[in-house]
Amino acid sequence: MELNLIGDKPLATAAMLNLVGPEVLVIDARQIGFVCPLDLAGMLAIAHWASAVAIPVTFFLPREPNTASYFQRMDVLRRMPRHTQILGRVAPEKRVDLPHRLLEVSPLTRATVDDLAEKVGYLITEFYPPDVGPALTKACNELLDNAVEHGESTEGAFIAAQTYTGETTEQPRLELAVCDNGIGVLEHLRQNSEYQHLNADVHALEEALKDGVTGTSDKRGHGLGDLITGGEKHGTIRFHIRSGRGEITVTAGDRPRTVSRRSRPDQTRGTWAWLSHELPQHP
């Protein structure tokens, strides 16, 4: 099986896991361009799922030296499963810690969630003005809590985050991704008798974005719906979630909210969530 990562933000756009071929997972990042947190967390989630079911993993580093060094800097190489065959070259690392700018890709578990939430909160408060930071921190913590409560598995969950000044992007923004190998949104919601009628991943994702929807009998907060509402009050939020064969992207902010949904030909194991947020543009 093979995952070809070509161009900019491949796992956020067109890249799909091809299951045809021998029982070996090849992650080919040689032609990758611009990389986002979803690419980092997603490829590690796929690699650890394969390793957990005894499928050998081979990882081709990007040909572009700066991109290969970025993979190293964001701890992708260190977090690959043991015995992964890593092919390619990176320059000797000259590491500078930037906790106010980025969160290296990290395993997300019940044991690490509090520490990671603190790191995400620091990253956000350093980037956003005081009247915005708390709301965005709350939104991001919702993603961490969801992954730990509903997506924990032996195959792992991963988080990555970064703020961008605008030098390499059109607009300064925050991006955060959480990718887990849990049971997925459909199976989680079907644990609640209210949602046992659901039989398609995309429909389960639509329900999960509504206020108060949960797969447990507990009455919880507004969850993912509140995440989007909180983000759009302070700028433009783009929230992308995929699970099983479903995928939904919500964009909300100054303009009317838009929702795009589709069924994917491949299958996402567990749940992947990617949040991107920009402050309003001032003339």
Image (spheres, helix red, strand yellow):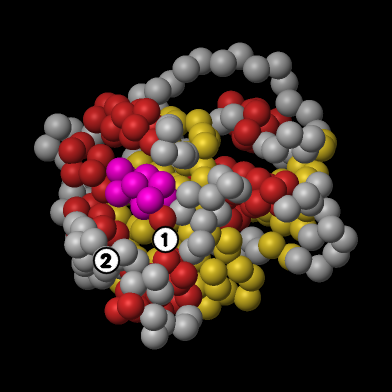
The region drawn magenta spans 140-149
Above/below status of 229 relative to 148: below
Three-letter amino acid code at the position of disc 2: Ser
Seen from the viewer's position, the closer of residues 38 and 118 is 118
Label 1 amino acid? His
Identify the secondary structure beneath mark 2. Answer: loop
Compare residues 236 and 157 and report the one nearer the observer.
157
Callout 2 environment at 10 Å: few (<14), some (14 to 19), or many (20+)?
few
Q: Is residue 43 left or right of residue 131?
A: right
The residue singled out by tag 2 in the image is 217
Residue drawn at x 62%, y 44% as measured from the top left: 44
Q: Position of residue 133 (x, y in %)?
A: 20, 37
**Vertical position of residue 9 compared to residue 203: above or below:** above
Q: Residues within 10 Å of mark 1 (few under 14, many from 20)?
A: many
Residue at the (77%, 38%) spot, across then down: 84
Instruction: Give the total of numbered labels.
Output: 2
In this rendering, the label closer to the viewer, 1 or 2: 2
Q: Is residue 147 left or right of residue 126?
A: right
Q: Let me know if residue 214 appears in the view.
A: yes
* Residue 47 forms part of the magenta stretch: no
Q: Position of residue 237 (x, y in %)?
A: 30, 55
The numbered mark, 1 or 2, whose residue comes first in the sequence reads: 2
How far across and down, in percent of the image, does residue 159 sit? Answer: 47, 41
| Magenta stretch encompasses residue 141 | yes
Q: CA distance from mark 1 to mark 2?
A: 26 Å
**Residue at 73% in and 53% down:** 53
Residue 236's place in the image compared with 95, above or below, is below
Left or right relative to 38: residue 72: right
Element class at badge 1 = strand
Q: Where does label 1 land, which residue?
A: 240
